[in-house]
Image: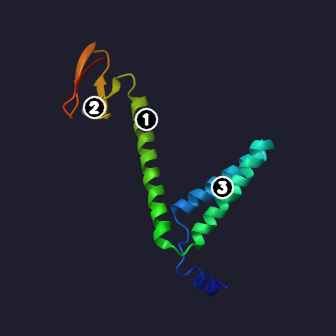
Amino acid sequence: MRGWFIRFMHGRNGTDEFSLFLSIFCLITLIFSRLLGGAVGFFLHWLGFALLFWCYFRIFSRKLDLRQRENQKYLAAKRKFRTKLKQAKTRFQQRHDYRFFNCPACRITLRVPKGKGKILIRCKCGENFTRKS
Ligand SMILES: [Zn+2]
């Protein structure tokens, strides 16, 4: 039985981080479909099964390059989301001591000390702008 499964999975994508995420998301939608019921529950029920189908489709797929590209996109999005979350947490922790502004030219976030009145902020891109700190 085990040998058959190993031969069956040979050349297939198998589980990766994206399929793990899909299976967890599927489980959450199915739980919420039971809790909510009605039209929303019906929608979540079918969304959950669609996610489950997508998850198994990815696991048994033989198109390794496509599945690995999808997984890389997922990992990049996850990394971006975690970075944004970490930055928001840091900003929240420093909200009493610093103010945060976005540079009007390059959109980068700049941190200035709070309570210094109206100050000239100089970005590393060369843009200067005035804000009340
Ligand atoms: Zn700038």
Q: Does any atom of ligand 1 lie closer than 8 Å to the CB of label 1?
A: no
Please determine whether, in this image, residue 40 is positioned above or below residue 8: above
Quarter of the image for residue 117 reads top left
For badge 2, the amino acid type reads Ala
At x 43%, y 35%, the residue is 88
Q: Does any atom of ligand 1 lie closer than 8 Å to the CB of label 2?
A: yes
In the rendered image, residue 110, in percent from the top left (x then y), is placed at 30, 30
79 or 130, which lies in front?
Answer: 130
For badge 3, the amino acid type reads Cys
In the rendered image, residue 122, in percent from the top left (x then y), is placed at 21, 27
Residue placed under numbered mark 2 in the picture: 105
Q: Label for residue 50? A: none
Residue placed under numbered mark 3 in the picture: 26
Quarter of the image where the C terminus is located? top left
Please determine whether, in this image, residue 26 is positioned above or below residue 104: below
| Sequence-first tag of 2 and 3 | 3
SS class, disc 1: helix
Q: Distance between the residues labelled 1 and 3?
A: 28 Å
Q: How far apart are marks 2 and 1 (CA)?
A: 21 Å
In the rendered image, residue 61, in percent from the top left (x then y), is placed at 57, 72
Q: Quadrant of ligand 1?
A: top left
| Sequence-first tag of 1 and 3 | 3
Q: Label for residue 88? A: 1
| Sequence-first tag of 2 and 1 | 1
Q: Nearer the viewer, mark 2 or mark 1?
A: 2
Please determine whether, in this image, residue 58 is positioned above or below residue 8: above
SS class, disc 3: helix
Q: Which of marks 2 and 3 is in front?
A: 2
SS class, disc 2: loop
Quarter of the image for residue 93 reads top left
